[in-house]
Image (cartoon, helix red, strand yellow):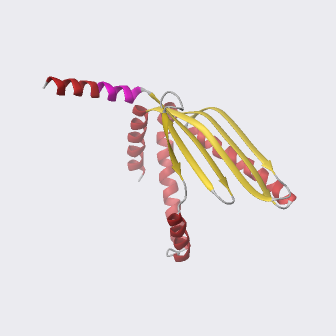
Amino acid sequence: MKILLICLAVLSVLILFLLFIRLNFYFEGYFNNESKNFMLRFYVFTKKLGFNIKFKETKKEKEKKEAGKAEGKDSFIDKAKRVKNNINILKNTFSASKGHIKKSITVKYVNFSMDFGLGDAALTGISTGVLWGVIYSAFALVCKLFTVKEHKFSIDPIFNKNIMKINLGGVVYTRLVDILAAAIIIFRNYSKAK
């Protein structure tokens, strides 16, 4: 009986320790014309003490995506109505939850680099300007939702080739108790918005 109580006490202390310790998530992605790869590394104190989660598109996922494109059951108007409804729900949920999420999740740094070319110098130049606008608009949304400490963006236009290479990396840190509290708040606000 005493051993059981000691084990429960140690387990309780361990759970409390895990709730309040800072968790780090290192993410890295690579996308180009031929392949894509995304890796998430979870660690507590140092990158060496962690584990990787890799995301790759499998052949079955590619086949399902192609089969889904071939079917096309819903009309365009039905899809547009669903998208509009979902955007309104997400907008209401986001505006009600962003204050708590911004306090609890911190982005230590984000690195984004892209080599981009369309084969035509004029189209590449115009498209590069549009991409800069899209990237900083998305970054403004990220800054509204999370606390961002440092960022580095780079788009290198390649005027004489048709190419697209994207590298993405960064570190996000939070505590497990903050993730649970944010999830409860988001779920509550999502239920109200729906």
Relative to 57, is 188 above or below?
above
64 w.r.t. 22: above or below? below
Instruction: Please say if 50 is above or below 7.
Output: below
| Residue occupying the far left of the picture | 1
Percent across and percent down for residue 151 are 67, 35
Q: Residue at x 39, y 37 (%)?
A: 180
Left or right for 194, reference 60: left
Q: Nearer the viewer, residue 44 or 105?
A: 44
| Quadrant of the frame with the N terminus | top left
Residue 17 in the figure: left or right of residue 53: left
Q: Is residue 52 magenta?
A: no
Q: What's the magenta region?
A: 12-20
Q: Position of residue 142 (x, y in %)?
A: 59, 41
Q: Residue placed at 73% from the left, 55% from the top?
A: 164
Q: Residue at x 41, y 41 (%)?
A: 183
Of residues 128 and 61, the one drawn nearer to the viewer in this rendering: 61
Which residue is at the front of the view, 8 or 152? 8
Most common secondary structure along the magenta stretch: helix
Task: Give the image location of residue 89, x and y in percent.
Answer: 47, 53
Vertical side of 77 occupied by 35: above or below: above
Q: Position of residue 37 (x, y in %)?
A: 59, 52
Q: Is residue 128 left or right of residue 172?
A: right
Count of numbered tags: 0
